[in-house]
Amino acid sequence: MNAYTSRVLEGLKTRNAHEPEFIQAATEILNSISPVFDKHPEYEAASLLERFVEPERVIIFRVPWIDDQGKAQVNRAYRVQYNSAIGPYKGGIRLHPSVNLGILKFLGMEQILKNSLTGLPIGGGKGGCDFDPKGKSDNEVMRFCQSFMTELFKYVGADTDVPAGDIGTGAREIGYMYGQYKRITGLYEGVLTGKGLTYGGSLGRKQATGYGLCYFVKNMLEANGKAIEGQTVLVSGSGNVAIYAAEKITEMGAKVVAMSDSNGYVYDANGINLAVVKQIKEVERGRIREYAARVPGSVYTEGCKGIWNIPCDIALPCATQNELDGEAANALVANGCYAVGEGANMPSTLEATEIFLQNDVLFAPGKAANAGGVATSALEMSQNSMRLSWSFEEVDEKLKGIMKGIFTQCAAAAKEYGDKPTNYVIGANIAGFLKVAEAMMAQGVV
Ligand code: NDP
Ligand code: 2IT
């Protein structure tokens, strides 16, 4: 790492000492992009990196709401408007008890590079709240979402900041938030993406992150003389990203043998029956353990980390950050896993990533591999602005093209800057960063 990058990283660690996930993401990214500053001394003169590692704006607010017992509850919510150099802030809203500022800053930093890779005009943002939708009634979720948007509406808009789903935020939550935004502002505009199909949502958005992940992995395997057909796959999580990753990779001829949630994982040697998973997770909002009771021959095991001990060819971590640590990475490598595609944001720890790279596991980093979701969100924004809607096939074709483009950019940057042409971590970070850097330089010190 060169002296400039190293100095900025040290400063960041000191100023954000209590934000481990933000430091983790910044450590990986700054390590990767260090060679860019050797080629561009003008960036240091403009303090470009100091500006890049500081979110443009963070909004923190109280969300009071009344539960079904009539008791007032209070949560803490955030919107991190990370970087608007290449477009309006764009990124999801996470609803999970673990949400804090450091996690949303790491997600914001990942998001700006991811959004840059899509080639579409979207800046980086992320938001969320420590509200836990689990176990809440629909009415409680609605009252929460309405209160959340009653404050957030001041800071978002179709041309300023366009939130979407993430962990805990799906079509139900987006619907309630959209209704409240429209009611307060009187605007029927594309302020949120991931909307329902009856009020401006895009066909294909629900599937886009998982499908896009599989398109990226397919491109990566083909570039390295391998194929998805006939391979055994692990998919962690059983939410939006996991379900549609499992669906597409199965359609491509692979067999998914395990899925999980935060309590444990289910193993099904015959291949996961996705209709059962969808019924449990999407319809009943239940737990993955219920799968074992419904599908003979499948086995449920408590503890979500155990999933990585199952032998596989391809692993798709699609749950949350740091779900795959060094121990898990070693187990995967020992069992013959040769490709990892990150559906979640930063699911692999720094140690796990290093183990994959050192063992020549083909590794697709999240900011590239899961960019299909936000890319399709940007397509939803376009459709809303044009007041028309594209068919599923049109959206899916565009998604395929975008994922291919992202892989091509990552491979090209890896070849130019990486220690080896398959270091897509360096590839994704540099390819994503260069466009943001150029836009920031062109716009002056702002
Ligand atoms: P969902 O809420 O639909 O699903 C999340 C899944 O991950 C659930 O199975 C959940 O299990 C599990 N999970 C969540 N937190 C933890 C935890 N702390 N430990 C173990 N498991 C956990 O979210 P998404 O599928 O939308 O998001 C999954 C990941 O993908 C996140 O990292 C998100 O940032 C990323 N992502 C999402 C995109 C999207 O379009 N939705 C786009 C790009 C990335 P449980 O039910 O037990 O909580
Ligand atoms: O992490 C992500 O890219 C998302 N949660 C999706 C963001 C979006 O705006 O669709």
Image (tube, rainbow, N blue to C red):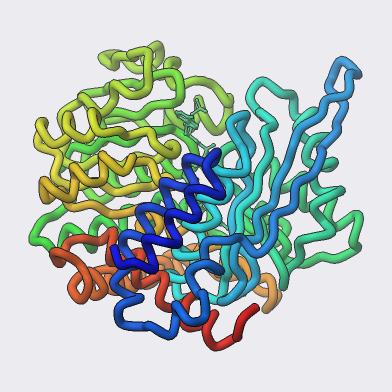
Q: Is residue 69 visible?
A: yes
Residue at 26% of width from left, 73% of height from top? 413
- Looking at the image, the residue that sits furthest to the bottom is 442
**Left or right: 293 in relation to 70:** left
Check the image and report above or below for 353 versus 308.
below
**Left or right: 149 in relation to 55:** right
Residue at 23% of width from left, 75% of height from top? 412
* Quadrant that contains the C terminus: bottom right
For the residue pair 337 and 113, the one nearer the viewer reads as: 113
**Left or right: 96 in relation to 143:** left
Q: Is residue 139 visible?
A: no
**Left or right: 319 in relation to 356:** right
Quarter holding residue 192: bottom right
* Quadrant that contains the N terminus: bottom left
Check the image and report above or below for 329 versus 287.
below
Residue 100, percent from left and from top: 62, 38
Residue 228, percent from left and from top: 18, 50
Residue at 52% of width from left, 51% of height from top? 107
Residue 4, percent from left and from top: 39, 68
Residue at 62% of width from left, 43% of height from top? 101
Query: How many numbered discs?
Result: 0
For the residue pair 324 and 433, the one nearer the viewer reads as: 433
Residue 324, percent from left and from top: 32, 34
